[in-house]
Amino acid sequence: MQDYDRLNELLVTTLKNISDTEEKSLIKDDFNDITINDMHILEAIGQKTPQNMSSVATKLKVTVGTLTIAINHLVKKGYVIRKRGEQDRRVVFLSLSEKGTLAFQKHMEFHKSMTLQITQDLSEKELELLMQALKKISEICANDE
């Protein structure tokens, strides 16, 4: 049972520390008007072709209605461009504005930097074990939905 308590504390603390570090790193300066959840919406939209609302909602595991509220704020703040489909006007496509692209890139830089910091002193074996453990955690969390 002692191992369970230590592992539980490590998992909870690690997740909280990553979240806090991400928020402190990203939600400042030019991007102090959005939340870390907003940043994850920008990440789900991505820089490629415009995404429809349903596909972004699915990626984020939220309803289209919930996403609509967040998108309204991101459009007003100038991070997201919303455009109706030409063939089907009921379909709404989302893409990042220039400001949204800058925020997206900063978010990706944070993730790259964090990953490099975590892995820089690990041996090949340690890295492989870490990846296996994180994969199992990810699969368990995905199956709980």
Image (tube, helix red, strand yellow):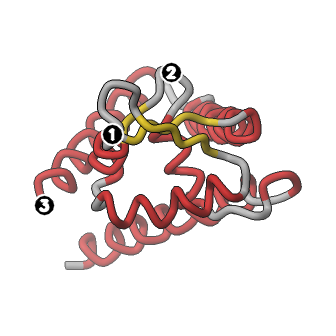
Number of the front mark, 1 or 3: 1
Question: Which residue is tagged 2?
Answer: 48
Instruction: Give the quadrant of the N terminus.
Output: bottom left
Q: Residues within 10 Å of mark 2 (few under 14, many from 20)?
A: few
Identified at 73% across, 62% down, the residue is 24
Instruction: Give the quadrant of the C terminus.
Output: bottom left
Q: Distance of mark 1 from mark 2, alpha carbons?
A: 18 Å
Query: Which of 28/77 is in front?
Result: 77
Say which element carries label 1.
loop
Identified at 42% across, 66% down, the residue is 10
Question: Which residue is tagged 1?
Answer: 91
Q: Position of residue 108 (x, y in %)?
A: 62, 34
Question: CB atoms at circles 2 and 3 under 8 Å apart?
Answer: no
Q: Distance of mark 1 from mark 3, alpha carbons?
A: 31 Å
Mark sitting earlier along the chain (2/3) = 2
**Residue 127 falls in image quadrant:** top left
Say which element carries label 2.
loop
Q: Position of residue 9 (x, y in %)?
A: 40, 74
User: Would you say residue 105 is visible in this rendering?
Assistant: yes
Name the residue at the left extreme.
143
Residue type, label 1: Val
Identified at 55% across, 34% down, the residue is 95
Residue type, label 2: Lys
